[in-house]
Image (tube, helix red, strand yellow):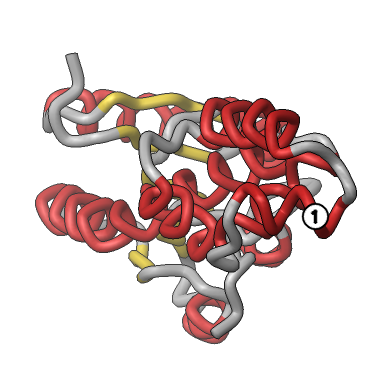
């Protein structure tokens, strides 16, 4: 059972992958290894939140291109970049693209594990909040057009009767739609529905 979170190591050097696997596994992380960045990007949608540790120089998709793609996908995963041969300009570019930090090889084991721990700790609340926002957006998307109209009426403070009048349907029918809205939105009360609508950006003021 991992206690400290997940780490995704991307490096085309098998010896480096093995040594990082041993180090991070011993330190209590759940480790997944990738030998190239494309394989990681393919797997990304199904991965649990964690810290990415990637080499900067790799054949095919390098660390810089990986950062650009992660940024384009608005990924919440923190990324640490490993550089060799004094690649300071590359490391600076990586930081500008959103890398949390960079490490020059050979690096100190304790420093790496401390950096990963702090990267996960700092990025996790945002990742969790992002996951919640996506979940709420999916609930809103599951509403039928009519259910969505009823929800908009409810969060605007209209009574069933007023919503019924606006769409020229019976109040009894509105009650059915209202029940569907509460079920699909997983809201137990009107105040909870309003809070969810705010998170989903349905209330602008």
Toward the top, the furthest residue is 1
Numbered-mark total:
1
Mark 1 burial class by Cα count in 10 Å: few <14, some 14-19, many 20+: few
User: Does 90 appear above or below 141?
Assistant: below
Q: Residue at x 47, y 49 (%)?
A: 193
Q: Return the x and y of residue 98 as percentages of the image width and height.
A: 51, 73
Which percent across, then down, holds residue 121?
20, 55
- Left or right, 127 with reference to 198: left
SS of the residue under disc 1: helix
Q: Is residue 85 above or below residue 60?
A: below
* Residue 67 falls left or right of residue 23: right
| Res. 91 in view | yes
Residue 183 coordinates in the image, percent (x, y): 54, 26
Position in image of residue 70 (x %, y %)? 64, 57
User: Front-most of 92 and 177?
Assistant: 177
Is 190 left, or right, of 72 in this rendering? left
Please state which of residues 35 and 97 is positioned toward the viewer in this rendering: 97
Query: Quadrant of the image for the N terminus?
Result: top left
The residue indicated by pointer 1 is: 165
Q: Is residue 162 above or below residue 151?
A: below
Q: Residue at x 69, y 30 (%)?
A: 172
State the residue at coordinates (45%, 61%).
81
Q: Which quadrant is the C terminus positioned in?
A: bottom right
Is residue 66 in view? no
Q: Is residue 193 above or below residue 8?
A: below
**Residue at 21% in and 32% down:** 23
Where on the picture, by quarter, is residue 169? top right
């Amino acid at each position: 059972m991992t206690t400290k979170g997940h780490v995704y190591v991307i490096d085309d050097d098998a010896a480096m992958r093995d040594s990082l696997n041993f180090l991070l596994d011993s330190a209590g992380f759940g480790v997944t290894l990738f030998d190239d960045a494309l394989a990681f990007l393919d797997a990304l949608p199904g991965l649990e939140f964690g810290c990415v540790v990637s080499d900067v120089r790799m054949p095919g998709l390098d660390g810089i291109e990986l950062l650009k793609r992660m940024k384009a996908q608005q990924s919440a995963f923190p990324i640490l970049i490993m550089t060799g041969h004094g690649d300071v300009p590359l490391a600076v570019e990586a930081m500008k693209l959103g890398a949390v930090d960079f490490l020059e090889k050979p690096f100190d084991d304790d420093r790496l594990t401390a950096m990963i721990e702090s990267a996960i700790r700092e990025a996790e609340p945002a990742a969790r909040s992002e996951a919640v926002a996506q979940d709420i957006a999916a609930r809103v998307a599951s509403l039928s057009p009519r259910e969505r109209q009823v929800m908009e009426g409810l969060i605007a403070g209209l009574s069933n009767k007023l919503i019924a009048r606006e769409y020229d349907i019976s109040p009894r029918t509105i009650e059915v739609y209202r029940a569907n809205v509460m079920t699909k939105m997983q809201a137990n009360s009107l105040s909870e529905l309003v809070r969810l609508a705010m998170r989903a950006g349905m209330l602008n003021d």
